[in-house]
Image (spheres, grey):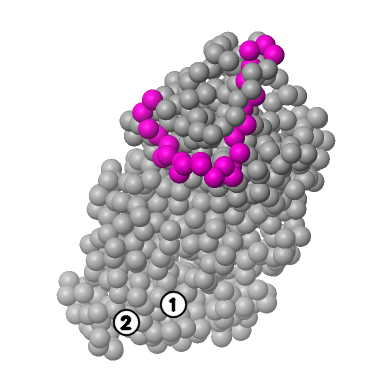
Amino acid sequence: MRGSRPPGNETKGIPSMASGIQDKWLTPEQAIRKIHSGNRLFIGSGSAVPLRLVETLSQSMGQSIDDAEVVHLFVNRGLPYVDACLLGKFRLKTFHVDPGIDASVTESCADHIPMFHSQIPALLRSGRLRIDAALIQVAPPDKHGYLNLGVGVDVTRAALAAARLVIAEVNPAMPRTLGSTQVRLEEVDHLVEGYDTLLEVQAPKPDAVEERIGYHVAQLIEDGSCLHTGFEQIPRAILTHLADKNDLGLHTEMFSDGVIPLMETGVLTNSRKHINTGKCVASFCMGTGRLFRLVDDNPAFEFLPTDYTNDPYNISRNERVCAIIGADSIDLTGQVAYSVEAGGSLGGFGGDFDFITGASLSKGGKPIVVLRSSRKGGQVSAIVSALDRARGVAASRANVHYVVTEYGIANLHGKCIRERAMSLIGIAHPDHREALISEAKEMGYIYKDQVFIRESGHLYPYDLETSKEFKGGLQVFFRPIKPDDEAMMKELFYDFSPESIYLRYFSRLKSMPHRRLQQDVNIDYQSTMSLVGVLGRFQNDRIIAEGRYAVDPSTGFAEVAFTVDEDYQNLGISTFLLDYLGKIANERGVKGFTAYVMQDNIPMIKVMKKLYPDMKMKLEEAGVYHVSMPFDEPSAPSRPKAGQKGDDVGTL
């Protein structure tokens, strides 16, 4: 615990500015004696936990107070009352299962109340979960006599209204925040002088895997997006990759120090939000003194109860909501299990389901699930064929849109089970993909004859991914082909005219069935390389171009072929593909390209001559040229930039 004091609260000691306040003051010991055996207590959590009261309470547990219950939103690990509860002196009831009490819940030493956080305030106010006493922490009364809930509104406002007895620990270090934070003295039965420090919580620094996940998620976040993040390392890593974004907003259950640099650099402005415009909205925050000083009396922040912040309708009123939730595991159909650490768990909904639902209803919204691809040092896959029975479902398969691991992004929205399974296997840890393919076949999720190349996951060349702008401002993302591209490659084929199909395949193909197409999308990235040009990239993805080469080990040359959707020809895409594939092949020791081109495909021949003016052409049977393009010709000029007007055709 480390002290933090916001500006304006420099005087230790509690002012008595309102009439009748002196009658409310008690010592911590006197206040705790107001609690009786069998009572149910609500305790504020996070950085708003009343430290002095819970220390005194812990000493009374199992002695002067027996058979009582402690209810809270989530557990602050390491506090004495938590240890006392877990030792059986009190009964612990929590709305969120923290890893610190995970084993205690599964062993029936503590209780979990599975509930959406948006619905907890109504539960407390209704009296269905009776609250006998609420122990909260507040800032000192202002000149008008109002206390302030500071950094912890969450469900505390409802507990305060529902409790028969309210004891408030007054802390001069508690920031005075704006929103639904003011507390009238009449709402409090007793006051206790607290410490002049707040409980500070420093989020762990993300590791390399988490940073990679953060990088991927940042690619999904557009300018003007409204964010929901958590406290874990992965959301923190995401925030560090948003420096190039503009006008982001924040509507979340909680936030931490990660938002500070985004505000200082002008990335987080909240200017495009449709509700609470210009405000960072949350129900509580946890962090360090730097964060507490930032939120103190700051009109840029609005702290509101969870029945407002977590209401899916309120969330959906903002556009482009990116709800980012952490997960422990996900099955091949898209069901998500809670983020926990060791052992089995009954889980805890937290606010995640509220925000996943709200984001899915938001215009342009993106529900995003993030997880490491494996656990226990890589021994256990986080992407599984079926969830462990001990793990609760945090999000249903119908709510999940994007899933992100360190190996990339899978967009599940609108996809069938077979397509979902292949997409998720594509971002699983490469060591576990073969087993997942086998299990998916057994469960009937994917084709029984699904091809799998064992080393493809390890060899996928992320460094070849790139974006290119073409004539008219067209942005195309180029990347190596993946096994789950089969559906998009099928669509590309059926978009071609019969003439384009003939020029590309040298036959009048009428169909492109799975048994043939899967051979094209499953490659080893060594003897065969294929690049696809994608529009949309993450949303409404569409492949509009593909180029590939296959190496002939007997000659050291590679046969090259490429094709472009007819709606996107004459923009420079074919030239870019041929040029880029040539650079890749040359760097990998390929001697040059060969190709077979129809005699009447004059535009394609011109593209090749522009890039390889010394290429050799030999007319073979049936009006087909065999073209040879060595990379080591001494007279070969520098290759021109792709994208020049009129230098492109569609199919080779």
SS for callout 2 = loop
- Which three-letter amino acid code belongs to the residue tagged 1? Glu
- Front residue of 16 and 313: 313
Residue lying at the far left of the rendered structure? 143
Q: Is residue 151 magenta?
A: no
Give the mark count: 2
Kindly indicate the quadrant of the structure image that contains residue 516: top right
What residue is shown at x 22% (from left), y 83% (from top)? 16
Q: Quadrant of the C terminus?
A: top right
Q: Nearer the viewer, residue 558 or 234?
A: 558
The numbered disc on residue 200 is 1
What residue would you read off at disc 2?
5
Q: Main secondary structure of the magenta part?
A: loop
Q: Is residue 113 above or below residue 413?
A: below
Left or right of 304, for residue 492: right
Work out whether residue 559 or residue 413 is closer to the camera in this orientation and state it.
559
Name the disc covering residue 110, or none: none
Q: Residue furthest front?
A: 635
- Across and down, in percent, residue 626 comes to 65, 24
Residue extent of the magenta highlight: 621-646
Is residue 32 something that shows in the picture?
no
Q: Does residue 457 appear left or right of residue 534 in this picture? A: right
Residue type beneath disc 2: Arg
